[in-house]
Amino acid sequence: MQGQAQQQAYDRGITIFSPDGRLYQVEYAREAVKRGTASVGVRTPEGVVLAADKRSRSPLMEPTSVEKIHKADDHAGIASAGHVADARQLIDFARRQAQVNRLRYGEAIGIETLTKNVTDHIQQYTQVGGARPFGVALLIGGVENGEPRLYETDPSGTPYEWKAVSIGADRSDLQEHLEENYDDDLTLDEGVGLALRAIASANDDELAADGVDVATITTDSEAFVELSNDEIATYIAENDLEPSDEDDEDAEE
Amino acid sequence: MQGQAQQQAYDRGITIFSPDGRLYQVEYAREAVKRGTASVGVRTPEGVVLAADKRSRSPLMEPTSVEKIHKADDHAGIASAGHVADARQLIDFARRQAQVNRLRYGEAIGIETLTKNVTDHIQQYTQVGGARPFGVALLIGGVENGEPRLYETDPSGTPYEWKAVSIGADRSDLQEHLEENYDDDLTLDEGVGLALRAIASANDDELAADGVDVATITTDSEAFVELSNDEIATYIAENDLEPSDEDDEDAEE
Amino acid sequence: MQGQAQQQAYDRGITIFSPDGRLYQVEYAREAVKRGTASVGVRTPEGVVLAADKRSRSPLMEPTSVEKIHKADDHAGIASAGHVADARQLIDFARRQAQVNRLRYGEAIGIETLTKNVTDHIQQYTQVGGARPFGVALLIGGVENGEPRLYETDPSGTPYEWKAVSIGADRSDLQEHLEENYDDDLTLDEGVGLALRAIASANDDELAADGVDVATITTDSEAFVELSNDEIATYIAENDLEPSDEDDEDAEE
Amino acid sequence: MQGQAQQQAYDRGITIFSPDGRLYQVEYAREAVKRGTASVGVRTPEGVVLAADKRSRSPLMEPTSVEKIHKADDHAGIASAGHVADARQLIDFARRQAQVNRLRYGEAIGIETLTKNVTDHIQQYTQVGGARPFGVALLIGGVENGEPRLYETDPSGTPYEWKAVSIGADRSDLQEHLEENYDDDLTLDEGVGLALRAIASANDDELAADGVDVATITTDSEAFVELSNDEIATYIAENDLEPSDEDDEDAEE
Amino acid sequence: MQGQAQQQAYDRGITIFSPDGRLYQVEYAREAVKRGTASVGVRTPEGVVLAADKRSRSPLMEPTSVEKIHKADDHAGIASAGHVADARQLIDFARRQAQVNRLRYGEAIGIETLTKNVTDHIQQYTQVGGARPFGVALLIGGVENGEPRLYETDPSGTPYEWKAVSIGADRSDLQEHLEENYDDDLTLDEGVGLALRAIASANDDELAADGVDVATITTDSEAFVELSNDEIATYIAENDLEPSDEDDEDAEE
Amino acid sequence: MQGQAQQQAYDRGITIFSPDGRLYQVEYAREAVKRGTASVGVRTPEGVVLAADKRSRSPLMEPTSVEKIHKADDHAGIASAGHVADARQLIDFARRQAQVNRLRYGEAIGIETLTKNVTDHIQQYTQVGGARPFGVALLIGGVENGEPRLYETDPSGTPYEWKAVSIGADRSDLQEHLEENYDDDLTLDEGVGLALRAIASANDDELAADGVDVATITTDSEAFVELSNDEIATYIAENDLEPSDEDDEDAEE
Amino acid sequence: MQGQAQQQAYDRGITIFSPDGRLYQVEYAREAVKRGTASVGVRTPEGVVLAADKRSRSPLMEPTSVEKIHKADDHAGIASAGHVADARQLIDFARRQAQVNRLRYGEAIGIETLTKNVTDHIQQYTQVGGARPFGVALLIGGVENGEPRLYETDPSGTPYEWKAVSIGADRSDLQEHLEENYDDDLTLDEGVGLALRAIASANDDELAADGVDVATITTDSEAFVELSNDEIATYIAENDLEPSDEDDEDAEE
């Protein structure tokens, strides 16, 4: 009770430090991330896989309108989890950074540079008053100098590089699944399978083709490619994740 | 009691995250949407239907002054539910976006682009201090590249694409009605009927011709057209929704 | 008690949503409107009537200084109820809008356009921080394209079009009186009589000629005309509203 | 007790509406007016009289430094009651408005126009945050088109026109005195006498010549003229208001 | 207890009115004035005398560094009481006003004009948010058109003109001393004596030459002149105010 | 309990002084530093050593993405502890300062100058409202005029120069280790060993080569050089710090 | 308890007056000064001495990095006590003022002018909102027109001139020591000795050469000169202040 009262004192108004050196508004923004359905990224020698759980709340909603994977540039994609409207702001920001880089230097922006531009932008919203932090985490994947790269951004504005990572709901379960099944020598196909099985692991090991988005950026093509529903269905079938019946309701994208 | 006190701590002043990652001011703005009478959108292969419940509070009020459906551009219309004065701001914003697009690119703005311009504008009011969120939801319908499109915007600034959708009072009842009766192969006429019957389903299955607005944007004409009272009366008769007597009082448009 | 405490949490500082989606500062501004004496508008085929109860608090105050009906442009007038100083700001705003329209387009501003310019201005004060809403309602009447038009603005910034309407003290009583006695085929003279009788209905059916302002905008003249005390006295006599004695004290204009 | 707590919630920080539609900061500013000694205005067919109670707190203070009546322009004067430093700001504002009018239009500003410029300025301080209202009321008197005019401004920014009016301490007593003794056909001399007797009525019917300021603007001269101590003494004698002894202490000018 | 709680509600944050029409921050600033040692002004037909009690807290502090009397212009001086750092700001402001007057009009600024420029500046800090009032009172003395003038400014921004006046600690005692001993026909020498005896009256009738500052502006010279320690010592001796021993500690300048 | 309530009063909103002259937000920011894993700096006659504990939380996270040592310029490096996103802002700031110096003066920025530029920037965030302090400490090491220099910055914006210093978790233990084992005549190799043993002292005297970053700036090369994993492994082996097994979880970088 | 609650009401947020006319934030900033180790200034006919206690907290910290005495210009130095990062800001401000004076007027800035520029800057932070006061006191010493001058600035922005003065920890003890031992005819050497003995008086009459900084500005050289460790050691030996052993820990510089 006392601890709760103390906590309340630090999470009103602007983002300030608590006596134990924490930024509660940032931590609450992390909770907003957990309220979103999961996105998963897997890095393989052949390229990066981004996959996102986008279970729709209503049969009348267009699945394509639940956008969780976005093209950031020819060679880079972004998957998100958390507050959807916030994600759109950051993705627009990332796209502008990528465009500016092409205009100014005549070449594609590096994935690490792109990520750090985004995290610097996020950090500003955690230090300067008059606005709240972004309630969203991003996976930024792409190919840089022929190498696949996969980054995560969190609401504090910290960048992390991963071999395979999950953001959003059930992160610890999915991350555990990734850790147990990841291998440095995965083919891209195996990477897609791993990503889908990780997402399915929190859904009774079932997935619908229009309930998930998948995109890849291979080292060969250096191009962001979204998989068609048919391609996704094939992967689902190959990985024994075909749904029996599905009626999710409460998840937020 | 304790939960209530905790909740109060997060909904004063600016829009900030609660410990469970929610933005209460945005959720309260959603309540403002529910306080408005319903609007319904139905997408058919022949075009998009927008319909709005605009029961007047007084016999001396001009029904036409309760504006719930607006022309956004030649090929696009907007229906609203919630805080009327807020809706007017967003609709003016959308019209300016459509005009700018014509001036700058010499062509009609895409429905998806228009929607996302509006949701980006809404999102700003949920993150930056000094203003409250918009207490209104919109249905943005139109024809883009010959295809009918129907979008919803909510107070968080998230865009959704729908086949058929309801906003405002009794949303869950109306949405259930739509889900049960929607068919991908509806004619435009059947779409108008579905929209009217959905609205009527929360009104004892009765509608007055001047108590509802209907507009369509067909793929043939690519033009926003408001139905006359006579046309609406015909649809009401065809769908057995003629009112016996009506005396609503408490609903807000 | 609990409800009251909850309510208090939402009406301090800036205008924000309450958990049930209401804007308390706007609702309190509506109370300020109710604290003002009534104004009434009546639309007839021959023109629009604006009438205002302006009972003076002191025998030494000049009745003409209690301004409740104002000329907005040659063809448009405005009656107010509520916070007098706020009303003056909105009326000045409306006049400038009308002037700008004449300068820019060389023609009189439409009554609907004028009303919506005013309500957009009002809405800003309900959404952006740093100011309170306007504590006043307006009746904007005039002739547009040969047609009489009568609009109401409220503190939320919503425009309504009416055949006959009352704002300010005793609104529900006066509105009931209007609903019972309004007829679509009223002559202008009958419209003036209806307006005066509605105001008198909350004053023991008595009116003093210098206790009420009346103005008309006819479709013939398209001109805002204020009635003289003698003309008003004649209407009062014709409608059997002559006062026996009068000593109001508490009403605010 | 409960009412008091509720009231406190609305009078901190910026000027906002209370649940019953009142602006407490404006009402408290009216209390600041009541804390000031009285000023009285009387309009007669021959001109306007302004008189002010300026009892000094100390025998060493220069009576002339307690300025309560000011020349606003050749043809206009202003008397004040309430917070002295605030009064100076408004009087300077009024003077600038009068000067600008002469420069721009080559003629004297109308008394009504002058008053409304001042009340518009006052109103801004009651609606926009970041400042408090003005704690002062003014009497603005002068001659416009050969006619004597007398206006009052209050802290809400509302203008009133009067035949005779009192502001400041003991307003209700003084106003009652004016109502009982005012006559539409007063000579200017009688008007001065009425003003002095009204002020004296709250001072045991006694006045010292250097304890009161009197100024007139006659329709003949159209000029603001301050009476000399000798002239005031003559009026005091003629009206039997000569003091026996006087030792006020607590009143604020 | 209840009164105290009510009072606290009005003195936090910005300067606003209390329910009884008072500005607590201004009244608290007046307390800051009382915490400062006294300054005294005396106006005689031969000129104005400014004197200030500047008892030093430490034998190692340079008495000259406790500046309480300042030259504002050739013909004008200022004595202060209260918050020293605030006084410096106002004196700098006054000097700039005097300089600007000489540059713009080629002549010395009037003492009344100078005072009112300063009080207008002070008033701003009591009405507009974002700053606190000035915690200092000033005595502004000088010669204008051959006449000696003596003004006081207080933290509300009100100007007063005096024949003789005291500000700062023990004001009521010193003012009583001035009232009992002031004479309209004092010579300048007698004026200096009166000022010193007033200050000494709150110090056991003793003064040290380096514990007091004295300056004069005579109508003959129209020049601000600070008295030397020897001259002050002579006055002290002539007025029988020589100290036996002195060890003040707590007073603030 | 009472002390806790008092403390809470000073740590909300902006950074202000507590009654005992402390800045709680700055002290809480110091707690954020302690929440980060340790960084160590050691200055030897041959050059400066920077070492950082960067134990990864997940086997799938790229160790290189946990950046705790950064190149600031050719001749200068920075190690951080605390809030990672804040560190990135300060390091970017430092890099820009170094670049500007080269552009403006054509030479490398001095280590002391660089440090003080950074601490001035930090101080601003502790005094001016609208932002929180930086929750990070930095070690800035490099060679200036052939001399090795090692500085620390803390969240208050104070610069300190050290022979050997630790920031972050377990500072007092590590600092004690440094004090007991530091020698003014260490070789660079011995300096690396001391830094690693200090970090290991809080980790059961074990270190993994990819769990620590090491960089040196020697007086010979005047160049920032990061050690490879192999080189670090050699040092770990030479200092008997090879890990048996490692499973840290809770530490923040 | 009641007094404490009342006090808390005035020290949150911006700097405002308490009911007894005090500025608590300024008084708390004075506490920050007391938390710093002492600095001492002594003025002799031969020049000014500045000395500062800079006991280091750790044997590995470079004593030279604890800067408490700074050169402000060729002829002026500044010693500080209190919040180190704040001191750096004020010293940079003073240096810029001195530089500007040389550029604009081609001569060295006067010590009094320099001091008052600094105190005006400090005062702004005590009156205008949005920032806290500076938590530091300064001693500004130098030679002006051949005369040695020694000033103190405090957190309120008040300048004082002294013959000898102490700021920081144990001020009253050190000041008492200065008062008992100061002589107007001290040689510069004796002045250094007095300053060192004063500092030592609060340290068991012991000083380490690297635990104290000393600088002088003589009337002959008009140059700021910092004493070397050897010179300081000589003074320590001459004044019998050699330490036996020293292990301070808690003092803040």
Image (spheres, coloured by chain):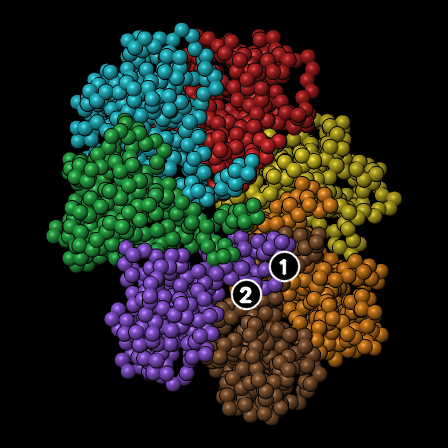
Chain colours: A green, B cyan, C red, D yellow, E orange, F purple, G brown
* On screen, residue D196 above or below C200: below
* Disc number for residue G23: 1
How many other residues sit within 10 Å of disc 2, few (<14), some (14-19) or many (≥20)?
A: many
- Quadrant holding the N terminus of chain D: top right
**G66 left or right, relative to B141:** right
**E235 left or right, relative to F239:** right
Q: C70 and E39: which one is in front?
A: E39
Q: F48 and E219: which one is in front?
A: F48
**Residue visible at 38% across and 76% down?**
F194
**Residue visible at 69% across and 20% down?**
C247
**Residue D49 visible in image:** no
User: Residue reaching furthest top?
Assistant: B244
**E125 left or right, relative to B15:** right
**Residue visible at 56% across and 43% down?**
D14
The residue indicated by pointer 2 is: G134
Q: Position of residue E179 (x, y in %)?
A: 82, 59
* Disc number for residue F150: none
Are the residues at dot 2 and dot 1 in contact (C-beta closer than 8 Å)?
A: no
How many other residues sit within 10 Å of disc 1, few (<14), some (14-19) or many (≥20)?
A: many
Q: Amino acid at mark 1?
A: Leu
Describe the element under mark 2 as helix, strand or loop. loop
**B42 left or right, relative to C166:** left
Q: Earlier in the sequence, mark 2 or mark 1?
A: 1
Q: G248 and F95: which one is in front?
A: G248
Describe the element under mark 1 as helix, strand or loop. loop
Q: Looking at the rendering, which quadrant does residue B120 occupy?
A: top left
Q: Are marks 2 and 1 on the same chain?
A: yes
Chain bearing tag 2 is G
Chain bearing tag 1 is G
